[in-house]
Image (cartoon, rainbow, N blue to C red):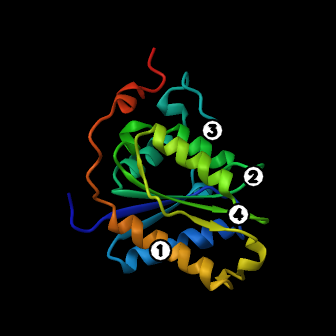
Amino acid sequence: MSETPHVVAICGSLRDESVTRVALEHAADAAETAGAETDLLDLREYDLPAYDPDVDDADAGDAARLAREVREADAVLLGSPMYHGSYSSVLKTALDYCGFDEFENKTVGLLAVSGGSFPITALEHLRSVCRALDAWVLPHQAAVPRSHSAVRDGTFTDEDVAERVRELGREVVGYAFIEPCPPTPESEENVGAVE
């Protein structure tokens, strides 16, 4: 284990003017200030076809590269806009290409953005997915509601929201090397889609 945690931030938005990307960059900057090395995995730069378990790795675009980059990280920041009460399909596809090898016992921080009120359901859905992969999800999470007024021209206008996002970046570093809990009966049952 290295002393400098490596944090990857996965941006689940494809928009050019993405508030999610701005917020993740803000969290990653705070993680760097706290002593981490960070990489933004911008899903616009990955060829990720819809997940099909019958397709060979050679035909799955950049899925193997994405999974390797997540696997090699000590902690992960996941960011998504809220679409129809949940997280984005592009982030869902990225997570479908990952599994226990990438997330088990890994610290994960969650961030969600919405044009309206708090994106709580998107955060809850992401938390459920990460727990199903036996990740250790930070209790602290960052929500960016009313994104059109919270961020203007790539800059936070709401200092309270900006501080919450920075705190997410600091906490993902502070807990990057947390010891996993002992196995539980529930975790022993979570074997995925094994036939």
Rate crowding at label 4 as few (under 14), some (14 to 19) or many (20 or more) other CA atoms within 10 Å.
some
What x and y, as percent, mark residue 145? 71, 68
Among the two numbered marks 2 and 3 on one chain, the one whose residue lies closer to the N terminus: 3
Tell me which amino acid carries mark 1: Glu
- The numbered mark, 2 or 1, whose residue comes first in the sequence reads 2
Image: 2 above or below 63: below
Give the Cα separation between the discs numbered 2 and 1. 24 Å
Marks 3 and 4, the one that precedes in the sequence: 3
Query: Which one is in front in this view, the residue at disc 3 or the one at disc 4?
Result: 4
Q: Earlier in the sequence, mark 1 or mark 4?
A: 4
Q: Name the residue under label 4.
A: 118
Return the disc, 2 or 4, that comes first in the chain's sequence: 2
Q: Which amino acid does label 3 sit on?
A: Pro
Packing grade of label 1 (10 A; few <14, some 14-19, many >=20) is some
Q: Residue at x 67, y 83 (%)?
A: 158
In the foreground, 119 or 58: 119
Q: Of tags 2 and 1, which is closer to the observer?
A: 1
Residue 10, image x, y percentages: 53, 57
Seen in the picture, residue 172 relative to 157 is either above or below; the reply is above
Badge 4 element: loop
Which element is circle 2 on?
loop
Q: Give how far apart the Cα atoms at labels 2 and 3 are.
A: 19 Å
Q: Disc 3 or 1, which lies upstream in sequence?
A: 3
Q: Name the residue under label 1.
A: 167
Within the image, what quadrant is residue 187 found in?
top left
Check disc 2 and report the residue beneath it.
83
What is the three-letter code of the residue carrying label 2? Tyr
Where is mark 3, residue-wise? Answer: 49
